[in-house]
Amino acid sequence: MRRTVFDAGHDAFRARLRAFIDAEVVPSFGKWYDEGLVPREFYYRLGELGVFGIEAPVAYGGAGQSSFGYRAVLAEEIARAAVSFGGSSAHVTRCLPLVRTLATTAQQQRWWPGIITGETMFALAVAEPGAGSEPADMRTTAPLGTDGVYVVNGSKTFVTGGVHADRVIVCARTAAPRADDPSYGLSLLVVDTAAPGFRVGRQLDTLGRKVSDTAELTFTDVRVPVSEVLGTPHRAVEHLAAQLPRERLGIAVSAYAQAKAAIRFARLHTADRAPRPGFQNTRFELAACRAEVDAVEAVVDRALTAHDQGELDPADAASAKLFATETAGRVIDRCLQLHGGTGYLTDSPIARLYADHRIDRILGGTGDALRALLATDMGL
């Protein structure tokens, strides 16, 4: 069945992106994977390609597109080649939507040009060692001094893009929580990584997404002017929660793309075996995987359409994310099994997909958290 969520603009972007990946990413990715980091100049190339400017306002040099389909194309082409664009994933998926929806006109004038070109890479720092992302347990503080400057102290972990970041959106406590609202008092502050007191700690060795530039960050008396507050002070949790449906749709799209790519790699690996009568199980396994991915595609495309029409609600996004990630986990596992021992080698595409996908069942809400949300939405 022909997919109807993409138009000629999406198709042109896909062709340009696939040619770029084949020519400039695939040949170098093995080296980047071993080093655990993409070169900083790679982000300038993504800027030239237009990856960072798709949803940016036209007034600042962006394309002004609102369709989530471009994000879907990006996820599909990256998964198809079993590569990664490094820490730029957070720049595109987590930070740009916050800037677009919360930044003041003055902030947008300062930030968008560099965001679009890749000269100013953003990262988002929320989780803390020993506390995770639970608002009540966050210990990073940023009291406002009499001179109109916030002073940030604390540490953050699991910061995607943390090593190469030029600006970090930090969730810090700027006021005491209220008895009836423990999330009150947390604000989003945009920290310049060149500021005194900012330090990049360990680059974390993750199971998958080896080139995602995941780091620990520390802040020691880092001064942040009030002009660098993103959104309403003390309301960071509300701002982050408002982005959850979009974030979960992005994860669902990525899971679908990875599952579809896993079938592609399994078919290539078993091409000389599947047609033979003695390998009927291989044929049946691939057929079963195809049926599951077809179902995920239908769910994802429905969610994409709802998003572009402004109708994607939190429950629908949670449902799509839950179904897509859990189904993709099964499909990728079965496709790895069809590779035999080859699939267990870390330099094989299917092994990278297997490891990279695992975090999708944690990010944006675990499976149990999403089941709880859906049960509540159902009145259960």
Image: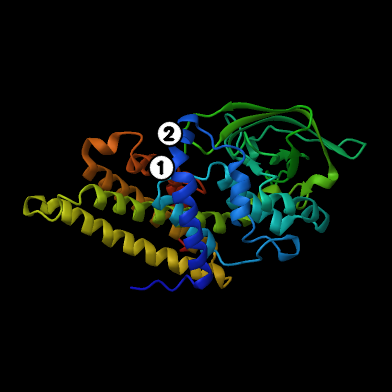
Quarter of the figure with residue 346: top left
Residue at mark 1:
358
Q: Which mark is residue 185?
A: none
The residue at the point 58 percent across, 32 percent down is 215
Above or below: residue 181 compared with residue 154 = below
Structural distance between the alpha carbons of marks 1 and 2? 9 Å
The residue lying at 73 percent from left, 56 percent from top is 102
Q: Position of residue 249 (x, y in %)?
A: 50, 58
Give the image quarter of residue 246.
Answer: bottom right
Image point (63%, 57%), residue name:
242
Quadrant of image for the C terminus: bottom left
In contact (CB < 8 Å): disc 1 and disc 2: yes
SS for callout 2: loop
- Above or below residue 123? Residue 376 is below
Mark 1 is on which residue type?
A: Arg
Nearer-the-camera pick, 200 or 247: 200
**Residue 295 location (% of width, % of height):** 33, 64
| Residue 58 lies in quadrant | bottom right
Instruction: Of the two numbered discs 1 and 2 on the same chain, state the one appearing first in sequence.
Output: 2
